[in-house]
Amino acid sequence: MHHGARSIGASADGPGGASAGDADAARTSRLFATRRLILKASFTLPALAALGCTRHADRAEQPRQLVYFQPAERDFVDAASERLIPDGDDGLGARAAAVTVFIDSQLAGPYGQAAAWYMEGPFAKGTPEQGYQLPLTPAQLYRAAIADIDGHCQNAFGKRFAALAPADQDATLHALEKGDLELPHASAKEFFDMLLKNTQEGFLADPLYGGNRGFAGWKLVGFPGPRYNYMFEITQYGKPYPLPTVGLLGRNGQLVWS
Amino acid sequence: MATRLPSVDVVLVGFGWTASILGHELADAGLKVLALERGIYRDTVPDFATTHIQDELKYAVRNSIFEDAKRETLTFRNSMDQTALPMRHLGSFRPGSGVGGAGVHWNGQTWRFLPTDFKIRSETEARYGKGFIPADMTIQDWGVTYEELEPYYDKFEYLCGISGQAGNIQGRIQEGGNPFEGPRARGYPLPPLLRSAGTVLFDKAAREVGFKPFACPAANTSAAYKNPLGVQMGPCTYCGYCEWFGCGNYSKASPQTTILPVLLQNKNFSYRTRCDVTRVNLDASGKRATGVTYVDGDGKEFEQPAELVVLCAFAQHNVHLLLLSNIGKKYDPQSNTGVVGRNYAYQITSSVEVFVDELMNPFMGAGALGQAVDEFNGDNFDHGPAGFVGGGYIALWTTGGRPILQHHVPDGTPKWGEGWKKAMAENYLRSASIATHGSVMSYRDSYLDLDPTYRDIYGNPLLRLTFDFHDNEHRMSRFVTDKATLIAKALPGLRSLKVNQRDGHYSIVPYQTTHNTGGAAMGDDPKTSVVNRYLQSWDVPNVFVMGSSVFPQNAGYNPTGTVGALAYWAADAIRNRYMKNPGPLVAA
């Protein structure tokens, strides 16, 4: 496999890499041009909107209606997910990426209802190696745990979780993670693990599902999205991939379904 | 009351890789063959189209083309003194459901087992002495040799259009291939896939420490290919969505891309979907199968008579069906008698995550795009000083960079918050994982039986899995992981590494591999095997069992190559021997 080692050198200094880069830049700018044309066309055709063809960007700006969460639950997930993936100089966080929208719709769907899970009794605690054994679906676990956590925060701080200072929110999340906080109706640790997993999913899943808005998660890490063909680029060792981020629904990274 | 249907010559339970192979071979021989599949029909168009298949959440995270635990799961415990509890959703392994089976969502890592793997007990005893194998380790020879299987490995590899570099052609070692592999009659049908940035670094580092790295054999096409059945495949585009996905590009070998276009035109072959086979029916003697009973998608029960029944479901489901149908003597670990459910095994894996200066672009990949070393697999090294049985390969795979499940953060990174986010941003493009993939031996206390408490949707007892890693496997895995760490430390531009040993109990929770084996072991002795060397039931000779359920223990390689070879081997025996004289092919 000596050809591989040689290719590294070639891509760093060789003329092949440079000309390929130019070609890609040209391709990129063509694609951008096409996109501008499409957007322009949609601005100049208001009749389409009247016919029900709303522009994608318009919908994304509107506050999204909750499907499963009650307002207090939304506030909790907004606040908690933002602590798990905070906004910062390095990029947008969970709130800006609309992670709550993602989790809300996931809980309303088959995942939230444990549609593909074996949920027959008897239920027993089991060992860590035996995995999830609660009689609650993910949607039920969120409902029970959030009520318990907000109840705890009212007692301990006189406020709901969402209204706490970030440091107190972090302390509460750490206590859930370690299982130090005893919740009356749910397992703190199971809930925390699920919330963290779902938050990361909402940050990094295709925007099709409502999160990762504006490709916030993908842009943070440098994932260009589900592209089809890297036959040329795969051996351009050490070179950044030049084309812009795409999702399954295209380039704008917005939620386009209602 | 079940509706009785007209009889067929052969009924295949399941319609994945092995059923497709058996279906083609037996329909081609003139038999009327029917496959019963519990899942739905799916095909490259429209089900795997690249416009929607590249969806990590739907397929890799929400498991939408895998087995549905609500309909089919098992209970699990680490040891016999525990109470088994249901696996409530998929975790450690992900069997497929639907036409093509797990052959739709596999990576395409297509290995041959070593010649010594098939004779592990006799070879180990001969080389290291009888006392070397622990008393509770129930490993056994397969009853078939590598030399006998070689033509059938070849047949499966040419069916799939494997991309790779041979290491041993008829005893001559080939530069750039795996020098430890058994001799093959000819090279792979296609050259290796293009090398990813990660595999190039691995290759360099492995050579640096004195190993002989090679391009892993891949059922992902490095070029256009027409297989011996005349089915055409297109070149892989390295989109990084093989593992957990169907291929939209006709580039990953699956039943859909290699056999079905021909098989589905054969008038001797038919299939029905959404049919859950619940029993193999036996006549009054208990020594002859009369067919199967199944429940269709509307909940109606049917009896499908057949002259020959071939179990082609996923490994543990074949065992479940044998247990529910009272075929063969059930294994009892207390008295150490019986065979059905005995010798369940798995795979032990570990990893060394590496963080480097160079841009890795991990999202450009393919399911079986890897670079490996095989110095520490099987009996390729002296086990005397090591003091354990078995081994594994070490590989850097670039299967894709799907960011939910495929991101790496350095040691000491917080699990969430600012620190996690920063580590993600800094490392996603500049990291990779070196994997070790190790064998698991079989043991007296690792087995499958029927659960006393939990039931499936038809009221049948769930299968119960009792399994844990043993000291031998932990020591082997640590040994191989140490070698992987050596390679990691030699990587050019290494910033840091994180070693993930597989310590402690086996857990059903985190994904490891879908390489479940055993429970219907093959062998030469009916006292220790369920099927003979032709995969034919010792007890009911018109029942054959396919798949990794017949492995007497697991080797250090991914199983599909051997599963494919064994299916062709058994099909040949049915076609050329059993059909001429139906009855036991080996005297018990």
Image: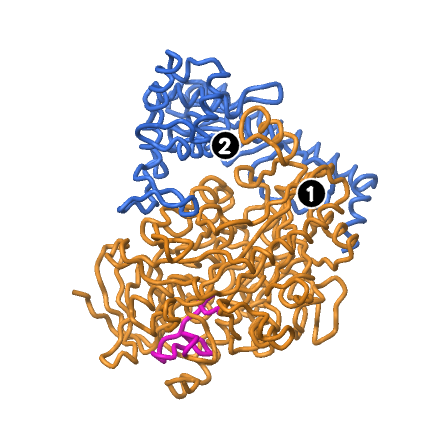
Chain colours: A blue, B orange
Q: Where's the N terminus of chain B, which quadrant? A: bottom left
Q: Position of residue B66 (x, y in %)?
A: 42, 51
Seen in the picture, residue B51 relative to B373 is either above or below; the reply is: above
User: Tag 1: Cα neighbours inside 10 Å, few (<14), some, or many (≥20)?
Assistant: some
Q: Is residue A145 located in the magenta-colored stretch of the structure? A: no
Seen in the picture, residue B486 relative to A219 is either above or below; the reply is: below
Q: Position of residue B488 (x, y in %)?
A: 71, 47
* Residue closest to the eye, A219 or B515: B515
Q: Position of residue B552 (x, y in %)?
A: 48, 69
Question: Regarding mark 2 in the picture, which secondary structure is present there?
Answer: helix
- For the question of whether residue A23 can be seen, the reply is yes
Left or right: residue B306 versus residue B247 is: left
Which region of the structure is painted magenta? Answer: B527-552
Q: Which mark is residue A200?
A: 2
Q: Which mark is residue A233?
A: 1
Q: How many marks?
A: 2
Instruction: Give, as a three-letter code, the residue at label 2.
Output: Gln
User: Mark 2 and mark 1, same subunit?
Assistant: yes
Q: Where's the C terminus of chain B, which quadrant? A: bottom left
Callout 2: chain:
A
Q: Position of residue B508 (x, y in %)?
A: 44, 49
Question: Regarding mark 1 in the picture, which secondary structure is present there?
Answer: helix
